[in-house]
Image (cartoon, rainbow, N blue to C red):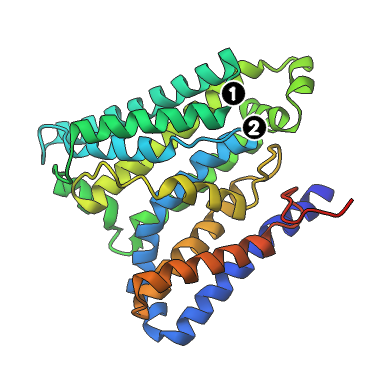
Amino acid sequence: MFERRRNLLIYLPVYIVAVSIYLIAGILQPRFLSWNNNVNLFTRIVPLLLAGIAQMFVLLTGGIDLSVGSVIGLTNVVAALLPFVDTGWNIVLWLIIPPMIGLAIGLCNGFIISRWEFPPFIVTLATNTVWSGFALLIMDVPGGKISMNLYRAITGKLFSLIPVPLILIMAIISITYLILRHTVFGRSIYALGGNKNIARESGIRVERIEVATYAMSGLFASFAGMYLSVIMISGDPLVGEPYVMNSIAVAVIGGVALSGGRGGVQGILGAAYIFYLIDNILNLLGVSTFYQYVAKGLIIILALAITSREKGLPLRIKAK
């Protein structure tokens, strides 16, 4: 009962803010509520959702992953340069190679952090620079090509009715929830984020769990890069840069405590909607780029202030 009440206090404000912004947008611009615009929202929100989940895994352990952006950029470039375009082999390679790269990078981050106990911030900041360099080395300007069959499959509709991106969103949320709440691995993540020493004393192999969470972060970031390659129908080595800070913001707004051990995937979708709705509204209203940055920053601060209660996120310094 207590956990349900706590979850309600954490996640309900996120969706209240998201729905409020959505309704305000509909009032300001009626065509915002059109089905076509909503399908566009489903399509565009997936990479941000995946990046937020990637960051969520490591934040739950009390860590952080600043290499999310470079993993997205590198896997995006690799996906766009795969051979045998417009054949079944290209799709097979697309499904195998980018995820393996993301998983390998995550394992490398986790191994360095857990083995030598280096600060996650420093390690992932360094590897972010390394893999961004690799992405630029492979493709210095946007280019490459993606199978149109893959594009139609990912951005199309199931039975000519249900948008595939919406199905992907529901599947991603459901699978992640099951991992966190109904597996030993998921429960170990929360234990590790709560107190590493106590987790170790209770028999949890802390180092393995830590490595595995960074591996999950790399894997989900690679999914974001792959998805972006499809909707862009090309690759861009710098496409992942905005997702470094955006993934952290989405995870925190969505209910994940920076201190670790609290939060979950339930609020990530609402937070991703808040983030993307702001961009969508400002574009529909024709607001200039400069004012978009200002407006988005102010709205994010407001949303963070509203949704940060009961998360253990200190927004104010109390006087002693």
Task: List x then y, in percent, for residue 143.
Answer: 14, 45
Q: Secondary structure at mark 2?
A: loop
Q: Residue at x 47, y 79 (%)?
A: 25
Depth check, front residue: 82 or 132: 132
Q: In which quarter of the view is residue 300 placed? A: bottom right
Question: What is the secondary structure assignment of the residue under circle 1?
Answer: helix
The reply, left or right, for residue 208 in relation to residue 232 is: right
| Percent coordinates x, y for residue 163 in the rendering | 34, 60
Q: How many marks?
A: 2
Categorize mark 2 by other alpha carbons within 10 Å: few (<14), some (14-19), many (20+).
many
Residue at position x 80%, y 55% in the image: 5
Image x and y of residue 51, in percent = 45, 45
Q: Position of residue 65 (x, y in %)?
A: 51, 35
Which residue matches tag 2?
61
Is 135 placed left or right of 309 in the picture?
Answer: left
Amino acid on which the number 1 mark rests in the picture: Glu
Q: Residues within 10 Å of mark 1 (few under 14, many from 20)?
A: many
Q: Residue furthest front?
A: 320
Residue on which the image places disc 1: 210
**Residue at screen point 21% across, 31% down:** 137
Rendering quarter of residue 161: bottom left
The reply to whether residue 171 is in sight is no
Above or below: residue 5 compared with residue 17: above
Q: Amino acid at mark 2?
A: Thr
Horizontal side of residue 7 vs 290, given as left or right: right
Is residue 242 in sight in this rendering? yes
Given contact means CB atoms under 8 Å apart, are the residues at marks 2 and 1 in contact?
A: yes
- Please give the label number shown on residue 301: none
Q: Is residue 212 left or right of residue 147?
A: right
Q: Earlier in the sequence, mark 2 or mark 1?
A: 2
